[in-house]
Image (cartoon, grey):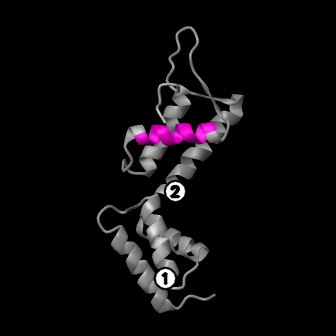
Amino acid sequence: MAISDAVKKQFVDYIMLQVFDDQYIDRQEEKQILQEGIKKGIGVEDGLAIIRQVASEKGLILERDAEERAKEMLDTFASNDGKIDKKEFEDAMAIFKNHTKGKIPEHEMKKRLKRMMVENGWNAKEGGFFGSKWFSAIEV
């Protein structure tokens, strides 16, 4: 279904209003924006496409995209030897933090990355003679 220019402009204006103060779209805001789009007759897929387009053009940050980048990085690290060590985890954290412009507290980022690892079956390399229990210490 084609979206009229007037409806699309209203939707884009709504997106800009939601990010007016922080230039950041978290998952809750994204859902709220999509719900508004549905009210205007914009489907979820079209709404997501418009959100991504606006984010790209205006330099907005999408939490979903930042999480995907961190997940891809963890996947790459895990594909080496099947495990993710502390340095690799910290590298993924740095990318996540950079792409969210620090909008998510560090402890929350650690929880999310740990959850990603557990859900995807990626093991942590920890312990050993001089190693620490860095992964186990992250509370989910």
Query: x and y percent of residue 105 in the render?
Result: 37, 43
Amino acid identity at mark 2 = Arg
Distance (Cα) linking label 2 and label 1: 22 Å
- Please say whether residue 113 is one of the residues in the magenta stretch: yes
Q: Which residues are magenta?
A: 108-118
Query: x and y percent of residue 23 in the render?
Result: 36, 63
Q: How many marks?
A: 2
Is residue 58 among what the camera can see?
Answer: yes
Badge 2 marks a residue whose secondary structure is helix
Residue at the outermost left position: 21
Q: Is residue 122 above or below residue 125?
A: below
Residue at the outermost top position: 129
Query: Does label 2 or label 1 sit earlier along the sequence?
Result: 1
Secondary structure mostly seen in magenta is helix
Give the residue drawn at x 37%, y 47%.
102
Residue 39's tag is 1
In the picture, the quarter occupied by the N terminus is: bottom right
